[in-house]
Amino acid sequence: MIDGEATIEYLNGRVAELEQERDQLAAHVERLRKAALDAIHFIPGGQVKASLRDAYDETPTTSLARRDLIKQAEALEEVCQKHSRDMIHPRIIQCLAEDLRQQAEALT
């Protein structure tokens, strides 16, 4: 049954690859939608073109990394808001969240 086990192992690996690709594409679409919304609301020529160009030039992998960093920052900020009374140093968590946001901005 080695052939069957190898096939299952291959398929599990392939599923993992496809799930990662799907997540990358979903994050990229989020970024493109944001750029389109900016264009609809702000229509100043040069800025809109630059925003759209940046979004189209960005790779799905970068979009996913950017999205994940922002989500991590949001989670830290939420913890800080909900539990700041219980924390010894909430400013440390706020600094971590700010660092994550800066890393996300550096990816754009």
Image: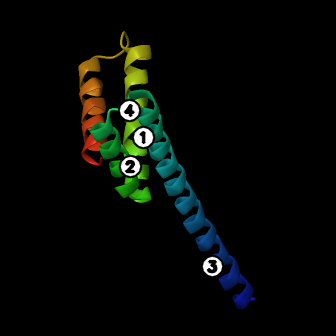
**Label 4 with label 2: CB-CB less than 8 Å:** no
Q: Residues within 10 Å of mark 3 (few under 14, many from 20)?
A: few
Amino acid type assigned to the residue bearing label 4 in the image: Ile
Horizontal and vertical percent for residue 52? 38, 46
Amino acid type assigned to the residue bearing label 3 in the image: Tyr
Visible in this render: residue 58?
Answer: no
Question: In front of the other: label 1 or label 4?
Answer: 4
Label 2 secondary element: helix
Estimate the spatial distance between the alpha carbons at disc 2 and disc 3, rounded to whole Å. 34 Å
Horizontal and vertical percent for residue 80? 37, 19
**Label 1 with label 2: CB-CB less than 8 Å:** yes
Circle 1 residue? 35
Circle 3 residue? 10
- Residue 82's quadrant in the figure? top left
Amino acid type assigned to the residue bearing label 1 in the image: Ala
Which circle's residue, 4 or 3, is located before the other in the chain? 3
Q: Give whichever of 73, 44 is nearer the camera.
A: 44
Q: Give whichever of 95, 62 is nearer the camera.
A: 62
Circle 4 residue? 43
**Label 3 with label 1: CB-CB less than 8 Å:** no
Q: Residue furthest top?
A: 85
Question: In front of the other: label 4 or label 3?
Answer: 4
Visible in this render: residue 63?
Answer: yes
Which circle's residue, 1 or 4, is located before the other in the chain? 1
Circle 2 residue? 55
Estimate the spatial distance between the alpha carbons at disc 4 and disc 3, rounded to whole Å. 48 Å
Label 4 secondary element: loop
